[in-house]
Image (cartoon, grey):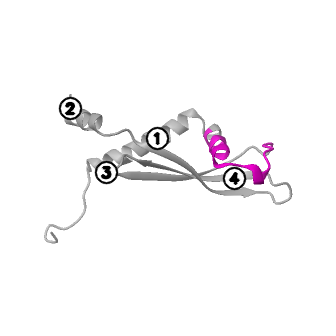
Amino acid sequence: MSKTETHNKSMPAPVLSWNISNLERNVADGKVTTVHYTVDATDGTYSAGVYGSVGVDGDLVTPYKDLTAATVVGWVKDQLGEEQVAGIAAALEARLEEQRAPKVAAGVPWAA
């Protein structure tokens, strides 16, 4: 087992939080047309996040005032599809791993 494999096994699985940051809707009928979302990941020490937006099916009939975050997150995940949702999780895990064990660093040696 490599050091990386050992390191990864000791780290807690990241916790992902899907959130809705904004909705765009038609004023006339209240139908949501675009959802802006964020996905945040944390392992308790490090964190990473992404922002995205998706267009949604204009036939969705839930009245705007009755929408919940859980409903809209479901729309986002459905629109993205399982493969892209898994890709977002994998990308966030990669960002957390880079924070745990950076491959690139910046700075000057005399500013310690």
Q: What is the three-letter code of the residue carrying label 3?
A: Gln
Q: Where is residue 96 in the image (x, y as percent from the top left)?
A: 36, 47
Magenta span contains residue 44: no
Density class for disc 2 (Cα within 10 Å; few <14, some 14-19, many ≥20) is few
**Residue labelled with disc 2:** 2
Q: Magenta stretch?
A: 59-77
Q: Real-space Cα distance between discs 4 and 2? A: 45 Å
Compute the Cα span from label 4 to label 3: 32 Å
Name the residue that disc number 4 marks.
Answer: 34
Q: Residue at x 86, y 58 (%)?
A: 28
**Majority secondary structure of magenta residues:** helix
30 or 98, which is in the foreground? 30
Residue 54 position within the rendered picture, expressed as x and y whole percent measured from the top left = 64, 48
Is the residue marked by circle 1 packed among few (<14), some (14-19), or many (20+) residues within 10 Å? many
Circle 3 residue: 99
The residue closer to the viewer here, 34 or 104, is 34
Residue 44 left/right relative to 60: left
Label at residue 89: 1
